[in-house]
Image: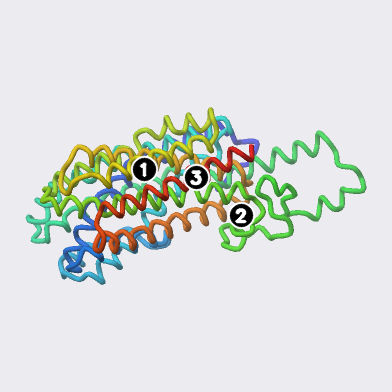
Amino acid sequence: MVLAPAQLDRATLQRKVVRTLVGSQILSGVGMACGIAVGALLAEELSGTEALAGVGTTAQVLGTALLTIPVARATGIVAAELRSFPLFVVGMFLFGGGTTANNQTRYAAADLAAPARRGRDLSIVVWATTIGSVAGPNLVGPGKALAHALGLPELAGTFLFSLVGFALAWLVVDRLLRPDPLLTARALDAADREQSRRTVAPPPDHAAGAAQQVDVVADPASGGVADLPNHDGSMRRGLAVVRANPRALQAMLIMALGHLVMVSVMVMTPIHMKHGHAELEVIGFVISVHILGMFALSPLVGLAVDRWGPAPVAMTGGVVLTLASLLASRSQAGWSGLLLVALFLLGVGWSCTLVSGSTLLTSVVTTDERPATQGLADVLMGLAGAGGGVAAGVVVGTLGYSALASGAAAVGVVILVVGAARVKRG
């Protein structure tokens, strides 16, 4: 239910939204991260080949948000128990629903935020994932003990912690995220427009036309698409907004390319470490440090976006991702301090692209068009990550981890170019 505009206090509601989303992100971070450290290892174990190790992550990022988390986790556990690789892929696809929903919450933090605070509020919600996400991979050891106690394969135990985390996060959002931030933002925007019309009356010859244009946004520069009905979330509308607004396209490219680099290197790092006979607990620790880089510094990234703008931060992300990938390409198999630094920087670079791209996208489209464009942006991110996951397994299986990381570094340079193009247009 959306309150009447007179009852709304944007700042108060925004604080409530951020608090609720922070709580849900902590819990869902556990659910999301638990599977990351063991997903590729379980895929390799079930399939019998490292070339298919990235398929699990590919299925995960393609998962739709309409699919349920409890079914996803249960399927993953059953797949490990039955030693079924196809069932494991189905489970990871379902798991992608939770990951997608988890990622989408960052936009909810920006719906009611003041423009000068949009990057910070969005990044605070991203940061909240740090607590659960860093803890998640370190549950690999306890998960192994739990699996033994329950008579399950040791890699399946970690997924039980994932199930609990996602279930609790759902309860927090379902009970506390009221009223809906996007619908509330629309109500406030409509009230502001009505107040403006009362303050400055339109000329008589334009009054009739204004009354007829109910679902038409007249400002293409802000992401509006003339003569297109406002069907929230439709792919057609999202594509139309992108065609009319190059800045929206740029934001999507920044996020998608950053996600491609991060996923392709991250998903095969456990395999690279296993080749060097690293213990499962050590692999979990490295992935924890990587996730720490993804989320822990995001408030600083958000502050930088608010102060200097999204484009310079996106360019910084491209530089950091390039450096991280180059360091990873020079790391030895197994455990090494160099790989640890590379994975941490990989997370930081991803954070720069995610926060800057998300903030830019939210700022250049209207509230009516946000569901469609934000949904399209995350679809592109998912497809980029899926492509990276498939390619990563094939490249490592044929050319090795070093070649994969070197290719990811080249994509990092592309991100830098995309960000620079935005700066040149002013």
Q: Nearer the viewer, mark 3 or mark 2?
A: 2
Q: Nearer the viewer, residue 322 or 203?
A: 322
Tell me which label, 3 or 2, sits earlier in the chain. Answer: 3
Q: CA distance from mark 1 to mark 2?
A: 29 Å
Tell me which label, 1 or 3, sits earlier in the chain. Answer: 1
Residue 111 x, y percent position in the rendering: 55, 41
Q: For residue 24, what is the image quadrant?
A: top left
Q: Residue at x 20, y 63 (%)?
A: 44
Question: In the rendered structure, which amino acid carries the disc numbered 2?
Answer: Val
The image's colour scheme reads rainbow
Q: For residue 267, what is the image quadrant?
A: bottom left
Residue 17 x, y percent position in the rendering: 47, 38
Residue 150 x, y percent position in the rendering: 10, 58
Number of numbered markers: 3
**325 left or right, relative to 51:** right
Q: Which residue is mark 3?
A: 107
Q: Residue at x 35, y 48 (%)?
A: 262
Q: Which residue is mark 2?
A: 242
Instruction: Check disc 2 and report its element: helix, strand or loop.
Output: helix
Q: CA distance from mark 3 to mark 2?
A: 18 Å
Q: Which residue is mark 1?
A: 25
Residue 366 x, y percent position in the rendering: 63, 46
Crowding at mark 2 (Cα within 10 Å: few <14, some 14-19, many 20+): many
**88 left or right, relative to 300:** left
